[in-house]
Amino acid sequence: MSIIKGRFDGPKDVVAGVKDFKEKRGIKGIILVVVIMALILAGIFFFLNRGYSGYKVLDRYSSGANASVKFASYGTNILRYSNDGISSLNDKFESNWTQGYNMQKPLVDVCGEYVVCGDYHGEEIYIFNNKGLVTKISVTYMLEDLKVSAKGGVFAVLADKERKYMKYYDKNGDTIAEGLVQLKKTGYPLSFDISEDGRLLAMSYLYISSGILKSSIVFYNFDKAGESEIDRIVASYEYSDAVIPQVSFYGNDMAVAVGDSAAYFFEGSEKPTLKKTMDFDHEAESVFVDGDKLGVVWANPGSDKPYHAEIYKSNGTRIGNFDLDTVYDSYAFSGENILAYNDNDCKLYSMSGAVKFNYTFENRIFGMTPVNGKERFVLVTSDEAQVIALK
């Protein structure tokens, strides 16, 4: 039997003791939670900003690796295309399918499992899925640009010596819609994109009205919402003293138009409406879009780092910004990072601007494309193409 020494005042002391115990336990619990949260945040910060000192080569592809050969990410695979053909490759450069052709300047677009390829100023369009060729389309006018939807539909801008035409094909090559671009009425088409489901088309036009340079963003609906509208136009927005050379869809109902001085974010699956305008501090010099993100780079005069990058989500929310010590030839998103490279130099930045990878290659970089997997890239130099992994 233990003897408890000290004064005891009955129930009051019991209540006070219990209260004191709970308070101490509560404080300890709070401290424990704070410590755990700090460790988690530190781990996340380390993961997002961890650096790489070099790379390892996973596979090589020496056949036709030169400036005319292009690579693109294609789901979990790699798309290789050049003047004489296009192939779907796995990450070991083994062929899934191959199609030969003869093109002077192949135009390629990818959406989901579908790929479209056509020759600039040529008269042939190829549609592929992950199994290979779906159909080949012969057009009656010169091809100027094309886009593909996740359902395989292809929208093309065609031209003859005097006029431009718009034509929309399904994956089997049948015409869904077509029309003449009335340059005096709408202006000159600069850029366009179609939604993943193929229902919406966004087109940027440039024109002059009363001596003032203007741009318009026009949305067309090829579903029921557009049936009762003239030329299927469901929304149109005009901007004075602006050139808007980039229009892109995010999924089915969000789009962004990027001009020289601002980005315009739209939302809507039937009649898109303007949701947000982000004005730039200076004129945009580079624009890159992927997934649900937009990147813009502009000059940064008066700073020790002469260029500045801004990163936005598809809804216009800014999620990153940082200064750059130089301007690069190419930019691309790699997961939650930004890849930037020029002739021989390459850097990988985090969204906050932390340099995660900084490397100078011996041979000139013809292309560097993020592929499936963490920090994996197809690196194309004057010697060969490689699948590399940062380490």
Image (cartoon, helix red, strand yellow):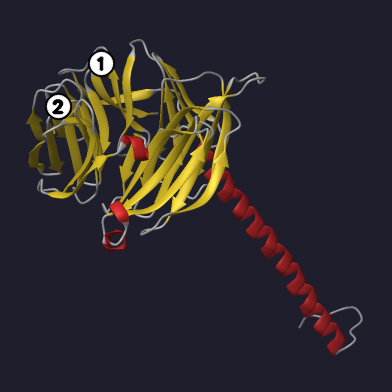
Q: Earlier in the sequence, mark 1 or mark 2?
A: 1
Kindly tell me whether residue 333 is visible in this rendering.
Answer: no
Q: Residue at x 85, y 83 (%)?
A: 13
Few, some or many residues within 10 Å of mark 1 (<14, 14–19, 20+) = some
Residue in the picture at 58% in, 27% down: 323
Res 306 → quadrant: top right
Give the left or right position of residue 256, taking residue 82 as reference.
right
The answer to whether residue 159 is above or below residue 134 is above
Dot 2: within a 10 Å radius of its alpha carbon, few (fewer than 14), some, or many (20 or more) residues? some
Q: Is residue 265 left or right of residue 147?
A: right
**Quarter-wise, where is residue 82 in the image?**
top left
Quarter of the image that includes the C terminus = top left
- The amino acid beneath tag 1 is Ala
Q: Label 1: which residue?
A: 67
In which quadrant of the rendered image does the N terminus lie? bottom right
> Which one is in front, 343 or 204?
204
| Mark 2, residue position | 122
Left or right: 173, with 389 as reference point? left
What residue lies at 77% left-to-right and 79% top-to-bottom?
Answer: 18
Q: Nearer the viewer, mark 1 or mark 2?
A: 2
> Relative to the observer, which residue lies in front, 194 or 306?
194
User: Is residue 287 visible from the viewing direction of this image?
Assistant: yes
Please give left or right for residue 313 compared with residue 155 in the image: right
What amino acid does circle 2 point to?
A: Gly
